[in-house]
Image (spheres, coloured by chain):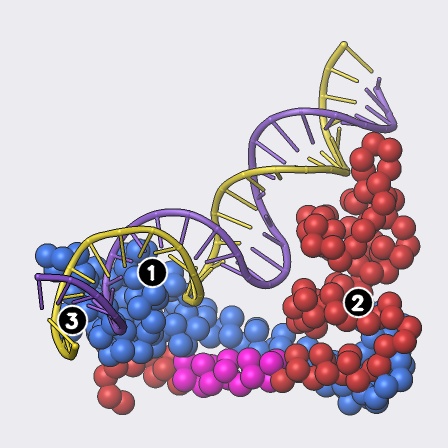
Chain colours: A red, B blue, C yellow, D purple
Amino acid sequence: MNIGEAAAAVALPAKTIRYYEEIGLVRPRRDANGYRAFVETDLHKLRFLGRARALGFSIEECRALLALYEDDSRASGEVKAIASKHLAEIATKIADLRAMEATLSHLVETCAGDGRPDCPILADLGGEPH
Amino acid sequence: MNIGEAAAAVALPAKTIRYYEEIGLVRPRRDANGYRAFVETDLHKLRFLGRARALGFSIEECRALLALYEDDSRASGEVKAIASKHLAEIATKIADLRAMEATLSHLVETCAGDGRPDCPILADLGGEPH
DNA sequence: ATAGGGCTTCCAGTCACTGGAAGGTCAAGA
DNA sequence: TCTTGACCTTCCAGTGACTGGAAGCCCTAT
């Protein structure tokens, strides 16, 4: 199976799959003509990676998770540690974004948004006391 | 005022201020020795940029906002448009992160996290049906 | 034979910095 | 006066995870 077909099968861009090979996440064998030849285990790994990335894990976390996935003697505690750390980072990001959202939505609400120059958004950014 | 003192005054790294100059967001004059010499209006701009960045605006959005800030004949509608667009992006990001959080927190909760290999997190990433 | 689509590699760009090297400048102390 | 150390300068490279594009090979169908 060539890269185009594999890309369609796992819903990842071909470019991304090449990149994953370059950084050693997958190692498809090659046909005599130099084309990558993907087999089912490659596709399985790629789907794993796609799902892990969709959950926001970094590439290095994906690499670690994939290694654990393939290690029959793993301890689930290691997996849970990675996931918990990531979960905490997600929570932090959400909190940061919600703080931005709170401030900004208030400013947007109070801005007339017409043709006049007066603007509480710029006033706030400019440091004018509330 | 040299860059170090300016950096302390506006709570931005000196490196960042140099970068902002490089991309044309600030234009401090120079002393005879080549050192940047910041005056109060430079600091004011830098504080504006710091606050806008803290609200998550991109550099290009900051550039646009700063231009509007300095344009006495601006229309607040332009500002509001930029801010509203950004607000929508923040909301999207929050929704994405919350979806990740929901999935992942469920998986983490159901993972024993001990020395055994069984792990619902890896099972999910591996595509095993629930 | 040729046209097209798919494949290959390699290089550059993204965003907003950040780190570091090599070297000039300045104020204080011995 | 000399030196030390803390500044400052520029320039180059790296970050994360791709993405776009160029140049060129391969395969199939007409």
Please determine whether, in this image, residue B46 is positioned above or below residue A46: below
Q: Is residue B117 left or right of residue A58?
A: right
Taking the spot 67% from the left edge, 64% from the top edge, the residue there is A59
Taking the spot 31% from the left edge, 68% from the top edge, the residue there is B14
Which residue occupies the foreground of this view, B109 or B80?
Answer: B109
Quarter of the figure with residue B111: bottom right
How far across and how far down the image is residue A30, in percent?
Answer: 84, 41
Residue B15 visible in the shown view: yes
Q: Residue at x 30, y 62 (%)?
A: B18
Residue A102: within the magenta?
Answer: yes
Instruction: Name the amino acid, label 2.
Output: Leu
- Magenta residues span A89-104
Disc 1 to disc 2, C-alpha distance:
38 Å
Q: From where the camera sits, is residue A54 visible? A: no
Q: Nearer the viewer, residue B24 or B6?
A: B6
Residue C29 rendering spot, x and y as whole percentages: 15, 79
A118 in relation to A4, above or below? below
Give me the disc on residue A59. Answer: none
Q: In the image, B107: left or right of B60?
A: right
State the count of labels: 3
- The residue pinned by badge 2 equals A66
Label 1 sits on a secondary structure element that is helix
Q: Could you tell me if the residues under marks 3 and 2 are in contact, i.e. CB atoms within 8 Å?
A: no
Rendered view: A63 above or below A127 = above
Q: Which residue is mark 3?
A: B1
Vertical order, C27 against C6 (above or below) = below
Q: Tell me the residue that label 1 is attached to.
A: B19
